Amino acid sequence: MTDPKPYFEAHVFSCTNRRPDGHKRGSCAARGSEKLRDYMKARARELGLDGRVRINAAGCLDRCELGPVLVVYPEGVWYTYRSFADVDAILETHVIGGGRVERLMLKPEQKELLPEQVG
Amino acid sequence: MTDPKPYFEAHVFSCTNRRPDGHKRGSCAARGSEKLRDYMKARARELGLDGRVRINAAGCLDRCELGPVLVVYPEGVWYTYRSFADVDAILETHVIGGGRVERLMLKPEQKELLPEQVG
């Protein structure tokens, strides 16, 4: 039996976990992820992606030091993002265009943001 | 540039969305998903999967009528599940064994649970 075809062409999970202020790992929500995720959901709707693409909130994705983070499946590509412009780039270049926003991509072994990712 | 290797070998998202009692679509939490997801997290830890496998809560996955639902990425395989035994089967057969729990799998076009899925 082969697996069914994907239910969503792109399934985006944005971490919206919140830790108390001052926690040593920080948290995505403490860095503004909820507002970014709300914008992404609204923007995906404006772009006519409803039904084919799903933008979901998720609990802690355990890469807090790199946050706010999101992951796009089924590709399994992770991004750090911190502005509406970053959200637009991920939606337009990756989700719609099938490309990659290389500047914002996270490597599996990465433990700290790169200078160009801090912006 | 090729994509990095997956950060998690298996990334499970369990819908824990809750709608008010009596809502026509129902919701995963109203059908017990929070307890099932807590069990799944604890069981994954007992099975030594921490670090390689991540069990996450997610907002509404928009397949409410089939809930409680979860999706395992990067495969993109969806399941309905309603008991601790179902959680064990998904963890042991799919996440650890790389197989599929065919009885619980959801098809992309599926709108209602099958008799054998209602249990």
Image (spheres, coloured by chain):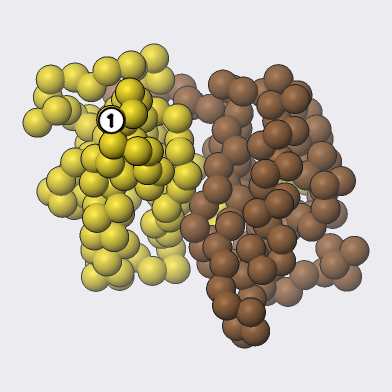
Chain colours: A yellow, B brown
Who is closer to the viewer here, A68 or A18? A18
Looking at the image, residue B50 sits to the left or right of residue A40; the answer is right
Quarter of image, res B48:
top right
Residue A94 place in picture, x, y as percent: 29, 45
| Viewer-proximal residue among B74 and B17 | B17
> Is B47 placed left or right of B116 in the picture?
left
Pointer 1 chain? A
Q: Is residue B93 above or below residue A56?
A: above
Q: Badge 1: few (under 14), some or many (20 or more) residues near its Cα, within 10 Å?
A: few
**Residue at position x 27%, y 18% from top?**
A112
- Does residue B39 lie above or below B7 as drawn? below
Viewer-proximal residue among A13 and A94? A13
Q: Is residue A91 above or below residue B2?
A: below
- Lateral position of residue B117 relative to residue B46, left or right: right
Query: Which SS class for mark 1?
Result: loop
Give left or right: position of A24 versus B111.
left
The x and y percentages for residue B94 are: 75, 36
